Image: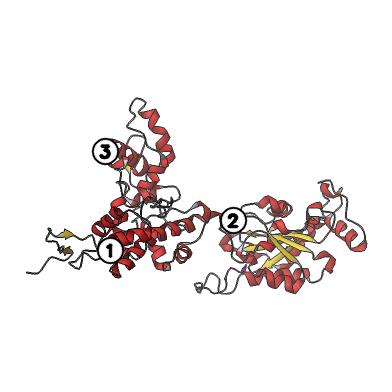
Amino acid sequence: MGRPRGWATAATGRPPMRSPGRPPVARREDQQRFWAAIADGLSSEEAGIAAGVSPAVGSRWFRESGGMRPVDHTPPSGRYLSFAEREEIAILKAQKCGVREISRRLDRSPSTISRELRRNAATRGGRLEYRASTAQWHADRSARRPKTAKLVGNEKLRQYVQDRLAGTVTTSDGAPVPGPDVKWKGRRHGPRKDRRWSTAWSPQQIANRLPLDFPDDESMRISHEAIYQALYIKDRGTLHREFTACLRTGRALRVPRARTRRRGKKFISNDVRIGQRPSEVDDRNTAGHWEGDLILGLNRSAIGTLVERTTRYTMLLHLPPMPEHGTQPRVHNGPPLAGHGAKAVREAIASSMAPLPAALRRSLTWDQGAEMAQHTELSRDTGIKVYFCDPHSPWQRGTDENTNGLLRQYFPKGTDLSRHGPEELDAIATTLNNRPRKVLGWKTPAEALEHQLSSPQTSGVATTG
């Protein structure tokens, strides 16, 4: 019978040593660079490339650790041998240099070199051979000082946390209500999908409730971050990863905060953000600066709105759905069948603004909707400069938001907006434009716009807000 796989016999005649497996290709320094890149907001693939490993390795590291950093970012101190020094030791060892010669060249103690060659040598081949990668792997494993997690060593605390996080929903008389049968697939729930019912206390609620429920038991204390680590990091606690479905977000992987700050549409560059918009737009003394948005209705129907900031003049965009909408499935990466895709919105804005003089086509402020992905083509066709608001900041285009509220009198939420044709939209826009406005000194938007067209030298209409 041959030797069992994974066992190696040392050349010195000592008992065989159990091999923990093949040393990884990546080093601790690579993982430190990887998690530093993740902290800067890069994706797992981009962080893997930045760390010097393949994108697939980066994705595996991120997935296996639940999106949380499992390695220390502190660089190794000079007290311990670095990987570069171990590479130098391997080269000098291959050149038949002795221990003292190696110690002189590395300015290290001979005993340090002797211990390194003895402790961290590769033994899988049956001989003591020194390789830098294997030595670094042995050193990293020996340096680990795993600490028993609080939820592992305290069964009462673990049960308390688990019951508040993933306990069964019950009625007022204590009868269990299981809710939908949802199987955990290792990923976040999809949109409009059933979710697991549970008591669903957040880790912060659990951590802050413990002192109230156990005021005299100091062992019943845990931080909310420790609960998150027990959920997301493998072998950090006894909570199953599937309990992440009980969190409010339901994320199977934790998302670094820097990555959320980088969220946004890829078609939006720094030169079209609202911070680059001319200051004259805020003054409202010059006409030609517009705000736009979509109002949505039943079955993904939509109407586009354009409002001039100075005169409050309103134009409505007719965005009819395509004939295939509702009758044929949408083709992957195909045109939006609802009718308010990027191309449809661009053409509607261009046709509405074409009759206006160039002085009334200065700028357009929009939110970061995908319907404006073709803003570059729109600027080229009409000469209007497009700017985008910050995410979740509707007040940055407050004039249009106010107008959309007025339009809901005619186009209520939950109604099908596609049944209104161009003539009806034009009639509603005319109605608003002929309604006197307090902000215009009780003039109508149509009168204010006519004043702008007839007096181009005028700085603007007098406004009170």
Give the label, 2 or 3, closer to the camera.
Answer: 3
* Picture layout, residue 53 above or below residue 64: below
Mark 2 crowd level (few <14, some 14–19, many ≥20, 10 Å Cα) = few
What's the magenta region? 336-340
* 449 or 246: nearer the viewer: 246
Give the label, 1 or 3, closer to the camera.
Answer: 1
Amino acid type of the residue tagged 1 in the rendering: Gly
- Spatial separation of the CA atoms under disc 2 and disc 1: 83 Å
Q: At 34% from the left edge and 29% from the top edge, which residue is drawn?
A: 218
Left or right of 403 on screen, residue 5: left
Can you see residue 62? Answer: no
Residue position for label 3: 155
Mark nearer the N terminus (2 vs 1):
1
Mark 1 crowd level (few <14, some 14–19, many ≥20, 10 Å Cα) = few
194 drawn magenta: no
Q: Secondary structure at mark 2?
A: loop
Q: Secondary structure at mark 3?
A: helix
Q: Position of residue 461 (x, y in %)?
A: 88, 53
* Picture layout, residue 172 above or below residue 312: above
Residue 438's tag is none
Residue 98's tag is 1
Amino acid type of the residue tagged 2 in the rendering: Gly
Q: Are marks 2 and 1 in contact (CB under 8 Å)?
A: no
337 drawn magenta: yes
Mark nearer the N terminus (2 vs 3):
3
* 160 or 260: nearer the viewer: 260
Residue 414's tag is 2
Q: How is the image coloured?
A: secondary structure
Q: Position of residue 232 (x, y in %)?
A: 37, 51
Can you see residue 268? Answer: yes
